[in-house]
Image (spheres, rainbow, N blue to C red):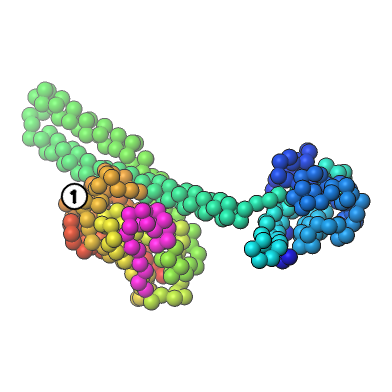
Amino acid sequence: MTTSFSGTVETGCVPRPEAPVAGTDGVLVLDLAQRCLSADTVLAHLFDLDANALQGRALADTALPKPLIAVLAEAADAAIAAGSVRRARVSIDEGEGARSRSRSFTILALPGGTGGADTVSLIVSPYSPAGLASASAEGQAAQADDRTAHLRAEAALFMRDHVLGVVSHDLRGPLNAIHSWGYVLERKVDTTDTAAQRALGGIRSGVEQQVKLIEQLIDTTRAETRTLPLDRAPLALRRLMEESVRQARASLASARHVMLHVESALVEEQISADGERLAQALWLMLAFATEASAADSKVMLSGLADGGAFSAVVTFTVSQKALLDPELPHVLETFARTQAMLPREAARIAWVLALCKRVAEAHGGTFEHDDFTDGAPVALRFRVPLSAA
């Protein structure tokens, strides 16, 4: 018989049961000298023993499997010493050849349990390592989903405020012009013409009301991201890039069958920056590139530290069909993906990439991208200083 078990007895966070656990969980109660005070029939059945034969015997002298005894003793000592719950695991290989089998158990040690203040109750539960691995995988998937949801929310917040900023700017221009022309007309119109003066006064009043609404509704709403505080700390650039690719792959690329690659000579180079914000920006660049890429195509993230700055460039070939196809998985808003394909005014960026621009500028850097034309190779360029100015 061989065994393998975790070398560290873990701290538990579960409440103490008021009574032994029924079902497949066996319960063994020891005193401080590790003498068996009681054992239930479930525990005896698990190991083909007589429960009465265990009572009153030292744990080390019982007929329980020796590897199990070792782990039970360690867990009991740890629980009593700490005065709190401890957990352990043990795997036992029994038999030889074709008749061999492996059984795994979790152990929960509860000091001062059902047996009294000077006792420790040991709950022994069979478990499947495969089931545990499956649960772990499900937990990791849930964490990835939560992270993706957070990144999507951040991207949406910055996009909203960027659009509000564009609207505020574009509305102020014509309103200011109307206001100015009102004063010009006022000097040209006969001051004795009360109707004309009343009309001009109404124009100026209307313009002032609209400007006030812009300040109250639009500018106030976007104040949340107008100033972006940074939590700077040293950060390894290579790890940042690889983690961003991993997250983007889990978020969308795997489902879309798009290949993500890192191309960089960076090894140990670091940057003093807000790591969370940089991760959000790189994820969004990769997510958008994936959104706009056909299945089986490649998205490349290139990184370079040169001239006192870190440059990250994401390159891909635009597929308008993939970007807008409602049948495909997506992580970015439909209207934002649609707007990205519209002709750009001046040097404005696509709304959906607003977070990248704000994060870059908050660090004293820049963000820009090529026009998104169906079938064309394009690049998203993110550049920030390696250290604060």
Relative image position of residue 195 (x, y in whole percent) = 11, 22
Q: Residue furthest right?
A: 56
Residue at mark 1: 342
Relative image position of residue 72 (x, y in whole percent) = 78, 57
Q: Principal SS element in the magenta part?
A: helix
Visible residue check, residue 226: no
Q: Residue at x 29, y 38 (%)?
A: 214
Q: Picture quarter containing residue 388?
A: bottom left
Visible residue check, residue 331: yes
Q: Nearer the viewer, residue 72 or 66?
A: 66
Q: Which residues are magenta?
A: 245-264
Q: Nearer the viewer, residue 190 or 367?
A: 367
Query: Can you say which quadrant of the picture contains the N terminus?
Result: bottom right
Query: Can you say which quadrant of the picture contains the C terminus?
Result: bottom left
Q: Would residue 259 be counted in the magenta stretch?
A: yes
Q: Residue at x 86, y 60 (%)?
A: 60
Relative image position of residue 297 (x, y in whole percent) = 27, 62
